Amino acid sequence: MATMPVESPPHAPKQETTEQRFRRLQAAWMADVEFLSDAGKIIGHPAFQEIIALGDVVVPLMLRDLESGPSLWVWALLEITGEDPVPASDRGSIRKMSDAWLKSRLEKGMR
């Protein structure tokens, strides 16, 4: 009885992890908005909006970035979590906003 050789299925592209997708979108977003000062254009960017759509799963990644230094993630964190730990007096200062997010998460025992 003759046997037919079995062909291996083509290698499917490896699925992107959440962090890989997050970093890819972050790189695209930063490349496009690096020199912008218009907050509406920065947060309205499609890659930024796609990052927000990823939801709670990217919050730890954003917080880890904030630990390295102030970041515009403070705007995304507000959108994703619905929380606003930033005192009114600190709004507008990315450094103070970043610090407020980190302090809030540490107080809640979250990273």
Image (cartoon, grey):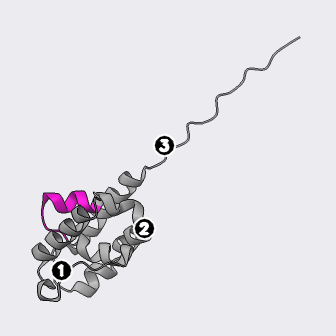
> In percent of the image, x 43 and y 65: which residue is there?
54
Q: Residues within 10 Å of mark 3 (few under 14, many from 20)?
A: few
Determine if the magenta segment contains residue 63: yes
Numbered disc 1: secondary structure = loop
Q: Which residue is mark 2?
A: 55
Indicate the amino acid at tag 3: Lys
Q: Earlier in the sequence, mark 3 or mark 2?
A: 3
What distance separates the C-alpha of mark 1 from that of mark 2? 25 Å
> In percent of the image, x 21 and y 70: which residue is there?
101
Q: Quadrant of residue 38?
A: bottom left
Residue 72, compared with residue 10, is above or below; it is below
Q: Which residue is mark 1?
A: 36
Q: Quadrant of residue 92?
A: bottom left
Q: Quadrant of the N terminus?
A: top right
Q: Earlier in the sequence, mark 1 or mark 2?
A: 1
Q: Residues within 10 Å of mark 1 (few under 14, many from 20)?
A: few
23 relative to 38 in the view: left or right = right
Residue 20, compared with residue 100, is above or below; it is above
Most prominent secondary structure in the magenta stretch? helix
What distance separates the C-alpha of mark 3 from that of mark 1? 34 Å
What distance separates the C-alpha of mark 3 from that of mark 2? 22 Å
**Depth-wise, is mark 3 or mark 2 nearer the camera?**
2
Numbered disc 2: secondary structure = helix
109 relative to 10 in the view: left or right = left
Indicate the amino acid at tag 2: Gly
Q: Which residues are magenta?
A: 62-71
**Depth-wise, is mark 1 or mark 2 nearer the camera?**
2
Q: Earlier in the sequence, mark 3 or mark 1?
A: 3
Viewer-side residue, 54 vs 100: 100
What number is the disc on residue 14? 3
Indicate the amino acid at tag 1: Leu
Q: Quadrant of the C terminus?
A: bottom left
